[in-house]
């Protein structure tokens, strides 16, 4: 870990509510990682923004009789509120339509052009005679020429992850008509000239996922295609010298990682550019945008002479399905984040999504019954049980005061050793981005101390009772700090029941393995941390969801 870090995640499109599929692969892992880094003394900042430009937003705004600016402002505010309710702790949540980003995008374009990486070319563009407009990107659907998947967008195949050079059997996504082809002039980025430096960067960066690197390198070996960065619409960042056209969204949106971070850092009185180039850079994404983040993004930074460093980490995870079916807003098969949080605490969802989400591109599945089982048996039956029995017993037997330990027997020594090694074992897993394994390690630690408490039988008031209570309470103290990155609200509740003041997030990570809960310390009030998820309620949720 470097002493500085900037964390970003794929920008939410300002065209609808955040759902569970969004947060599972990107925002939640990024938030957990940011909290972990801060606990380890890293000056870490989590930066994000709404992705404001593009044809879908323009059309949606027209339907609602709003200006595009009004439309995206609404969703920027709503998305931030939903993220905040889920305890996603952005240091800045900005927007791609900000004046800072518009200025930066045009600066990057001018520099790329000056460096010989931009050229103009007359092209044939799909045009809908029925709707009287050119059809960029997601307004043309057809067959992917690479994997033959049907109903794919012209700018991205969601099945194989590649960007089609030309979609097969094209249809207008607005009206379904077969579009004609008309001439227009666009700017292109010479992506194919960056094959060698991109391959070299992939080879040298050992922090990137090996499986992702391998198939991106295969794409490079197969031959890259120059990238059309112009769109014939009115809503976007205007092209310098040709204000009638705008940049393609994937040209400007990831530049907001940099422009938003620089604004935030400069506003803090720091040198934003120097900070960026001296920090670890993380970009958390889902597997559907690998092509953009492993090819377009680094090539553009290379094209401006690496003025801003390339990412050190691009943690990439799979998609979330619901009840084993693909999430689809158009088919109303999704769960909105806001709706979910009306029924269950944010930490329940954070626990479930982290625990089922490996560091891989494998898809994961949200299942209502599995959610209920994991919360009740793991979060409540294991972790909640340890907190309640260890602290509740101390309250009942020792009037809430931590007793002084006596001589340790072998079991006590083993228990203390578990605490002493806990921080380093967890840290290694989180640094490797195995967040699911790290959370499992917390639960294994809790299960061990439940067994330790049961083995020592302190309720019999025999020799070693005080030692058992002392070590069990300190294990809860360790869990409170370790849990903060994953379940911040529950972590703070445990902290307060331990009788500690302030916010647990301010405690350094190494405190996890230090027995800082001393004899004579007075606990706070002890109440259950979690409440059961009832089967009847889950049945209602499933019925409501499946009839949406």
Image (spheres, rainbow, N blue to C red):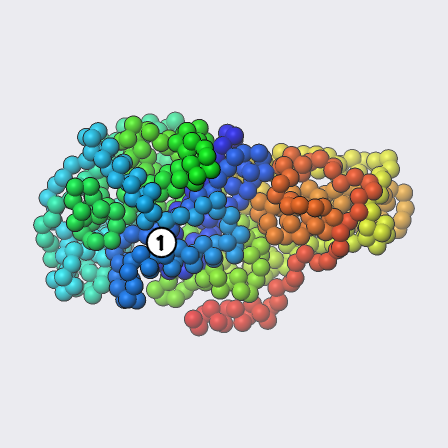
Q: Is residue 79 left or right of residue 231?
A: right
> Is residue 353 positioned above or below 62 on the image?
above
Whether residue 76 appears in this view of the structure is yes
Q: Is residue 528 left or right of residue 313?
A: right
- Quarter of the image with the C terminus in it: bottom left
Question: Measured from the top left, where is residue 400 in percent x and y?
Answer: 82, 50
Q: Where on the picture, by quarter, is residue 420?
A: top right
Question: Measured from the top left, where is residue 369 in percent x and y?
Answer: 55, 63
Q: Where on the picture, by quarter, is residue 78?
A: bottom left
Residue lying at 35% horizontally and 53% vertically, measured from the top left: 13
Task: State the residue in front, 154 or 487.
Answer: 487
Q: Is residue 340 left or right of residue 425?
A: left
Total numbered labels:
1
Element class at badge 1 = loop
Q: Is residue 254 left or right of residue 541?
A: left
Q: Which residue is mark 1?
A: 13
Whether residue 326 appears in this view of the structure is no
Question: Measured from the top left, where is residue 181 in percent x and y?
Answer: 11, 54
Residue lying at 27% horizontally and 53% vertically, measured from the top left: 54
Residue lying at 11% horizontally and 48% vertically, measured from the top left: 184
- Density class for disc 1 (Cα within 10 Å; few <14, some 14-19, many ≥20) is many
Residue lying at 64% horizontally and 39% vertically, measured from the top left: 507
Task: State the residue in front, 230 or 200.
Answer: 230
Question: Measured from the top left, where is residue 510 in percent x and y?
Answer: 65, 34
Task: State the residue in front, 13 or 71.
Answer: 71
């Amino acid at each position: 870990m470097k002493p500085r870090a900037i964390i970003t995640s794929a920008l939410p499109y300002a065209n609808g509510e955040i759902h569970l599929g969004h947060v599972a692969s990107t925002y939640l892992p990024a938030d957990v990682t940011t909290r972990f880094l801060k606990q380890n003394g890293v000056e870490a900042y989590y930066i994000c923004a709404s992705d404001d430009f593009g044809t879908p937003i323009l059309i949606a705004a027209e339907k609602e009789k709003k200006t595009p600016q009004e439309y995206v402002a609404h969703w920027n505010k709503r998305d931030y509120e939903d993220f905040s309710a889920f305890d996603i702790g952005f240091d800045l949540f900005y927007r791609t339509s900000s004046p800072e980003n518009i200025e930066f995008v045009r600066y990057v374009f001018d520099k790329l052009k000056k460096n010989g990486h931009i050229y103009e070319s007359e092209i044939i563009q799909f045009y809908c005679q029925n709707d009287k407009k050119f059809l960029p990107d997601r307004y043309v659907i057809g067959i992917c020429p690479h994997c033959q998947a049907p109903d794919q967008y012209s700018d991205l195949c969601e099945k194989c992850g590649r960007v089609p050079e030309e979609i097969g059997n094209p249809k207008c996504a607005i009206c379904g008509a077969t579009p004609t082809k008309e001439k227009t002039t666009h700017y292109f980025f010479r992506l194919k000239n960056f094959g060698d430096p991109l391959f070299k960067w992939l080879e040298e960066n050992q922090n990137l996922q090996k499986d992702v690197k391998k198939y991106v390198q295969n794409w490079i070996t197969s031959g890259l295609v120059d990238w059309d960065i112009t769109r014939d619409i009115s809503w976007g960042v205007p092209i310098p010298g040709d204000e009638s056209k705008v940049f393609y969204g994937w040209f400007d949106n990831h530049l907001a990682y940099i422009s938003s971070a620089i604004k935030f850092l400069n506003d803090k009185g720091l040198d934003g550019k120097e900070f960026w180039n001296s920090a670890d850079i993380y970009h958390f994404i889902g597997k559907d945008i690998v092509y953009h983040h492993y090819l377009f993004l680094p090539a553009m930074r290379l094209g401006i002479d690496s003025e801003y460093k390339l990412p050190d980490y691009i943690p990439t995870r799979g998609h979330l399905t619901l009840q084993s079916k693909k999430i689809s807003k158009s088919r109303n098969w999704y769960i909105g984040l806001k709706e979910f949080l009306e029924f269950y605490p944010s930490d329940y969802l954070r626990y479930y999504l982290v625990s089922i989400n490996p560091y891989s591109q494998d898809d994961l599945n949200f299942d209502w019954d599995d959610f209920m089982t994991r919360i009740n048996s793991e979060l409540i039956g294991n972790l909640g049980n340890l907190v309640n029995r260890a602290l509740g017993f101390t309250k009942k037997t020792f009037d809430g005061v931590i007793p002084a330990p006596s001589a340790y027997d072998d079991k006590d020594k083993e228990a203390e050793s578990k605490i002493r090694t806990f921080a380093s074992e967890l840290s290694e897993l989180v640094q490797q981005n195995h967040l699911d394994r790290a959370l499992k390690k917390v639960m294994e630690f809790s299960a061990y101390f439940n067994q330790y408490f049961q083995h020592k039988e302190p309720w019999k008031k025999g020799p070693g009772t005080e030692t058992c209570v002392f070590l069990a309470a300190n294990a809860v103290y360790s869990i409170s700090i370790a849990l903060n990155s994953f379940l911040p609200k529950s972590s703070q509740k445990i902290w307060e029941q331990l009788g500690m003041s302030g916010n647990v997030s301010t405690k350094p990570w190494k405190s996890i393995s230090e027995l800082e809960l001393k004899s004579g310390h007075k606990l706070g009030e002890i109440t259950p941390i979690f409440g059961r998820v009832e089967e009847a309620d889950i049945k209602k949720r499933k019925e409501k969801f499946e009839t949406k």
